[in-house]
Image (cartoon, rainbow, N blue to C red):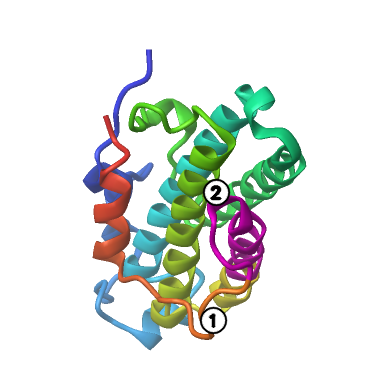
Amino acid sequence: MTRPLSRQALLRRSATGGAALLLPNGLSAGSGAQAASLDTPPDADLAYLRLLIGAELLAIDFHGRALASKRRLGTLAPTVTRSLADEKEHYSTLAQLLQKAGQAPATAGDVDFTYRRGSFASRASIARLGLRIETLLLGAYLGAIESVQTAALRLPIGQIAANEAQHVSALAPAAGRLRIGPAFPAALTMSAVSARLDAFES
C-alpha cells in the first residue's frame, strides 16, 4: 500500500529535516549567489530539485500505466517506451543531485497518483493525458532554468527540458495537436507546478 505524499511534503522532504540545516553557518536560504557558489545549493534550488523529482515520478507512473494498456497504444507504444526510459534517467540524475546535497529524494513508494476515469481507455485519451503531463514537465524545467541560482544545475536541467520538448512533439499528433508547438513554451513557476501536480494526488 502506497502512502500518499502531499505536494508540501515533496517540497520539504529531506534526510535532515530541512534544507536550511544544510547551509553553512552564517548563511540563510536567501543568501542568493553567495550560497549558490558553495557545494550545497541554496534552499530554493533544493526545493526545485524536489519538485522536479515529484514531476518525474508522475511521468514515470503515467508511462508505466500507459504501457500496461499496450493493445490500446498501437503505434504509440515505442514512443511511450522510450519516454519512460528517458524519465527514469531524468529521475536518477535529479535524485543523485539531491543526495549529493545530503537529502533523500522521494520515491515511487512515497506517492499515490490517481487519474480520471477513462484516461487509459484509448490511444487518443492516453496521448491527451501524456501531452498534458509532458507539457507540465517542460514548463517545470523551463521555470527551473529561469530560477535556479546554482550554475552546475542549469545544464542538466536544460538538457532534460530539451528532451521533454521532444516528448511533447512526439505525443502531439496522436492527441490531435501540431507536432511543432509555440516558439516560446511557457515557463511555470514553482507554485504553478505544485498546484498542477496536486491534481494528480490521491
Which residue is nearer to you in this view: 3 or 198?
198
Task: Identify whether 27 is placed above or below 121.
Answer: below
Name the kind of residue labelled 2 in the image: Ala
Give the structural element (helix, strand or loop) at label 1.
Answer: helix
Tell which residue pokes out farthest to the top in this image: 1
Identity of the residue drawn at 56% across and 57% down: 97
Q: Secondary structure at mark 2?
A: helix
Query: Hey, what amino acid is under mark 1?
Result: Ala
Q: Residue furthest front?
A: 176
Q: Is 136 situated left or right of 163 in this image?
A: left
Q: Please tell me whether residue 150 belongs to the stretch shown in magenta.
A: no
Residue 137 in the image: state x and y as whole percent.
Answer: 47, 59
Where is mark 1, residue-wise?
151
Residue 161 is inside the magenta segment = yes
Q: Which mark is residue 95?
A: 2
| Quarter-of-image position of residue 77 | top right
Let me know if residue 192 appears in the view.
yes
Res 161 → quadrant: bottom right
- Among numbered discs 1 and 2, the one appearing first in the sequence: 2
Residue positioned 54% across, 49% down in the render: 95
Location of the N terminus (image quadrant): top left
Q: How many marks?
A: 2
The picture places residue 129, in percent across and down from the top left corner, at 46, 45
Badge 1 crowding class, 10 Å Cα cut-off, few under 14, some 14 to 19, many 20 or more, is few
In the image, which residues are magenta? 160-179
Report the quarter where the C terminus lies: top left
Q: Position of residue 176 (x, y in %)?
A: 54, 56
Q: Is residue 115 above or below residue 127?
A: above
Q: Residue at x 77, y 41 (%)?
A: 78
* Residue sitting nearer the eye, 30 or 144: 144
Judged by its main secondary structure, the magenta piece is helix
Q: Residue at x 49, y 39 (%)?
A: 125
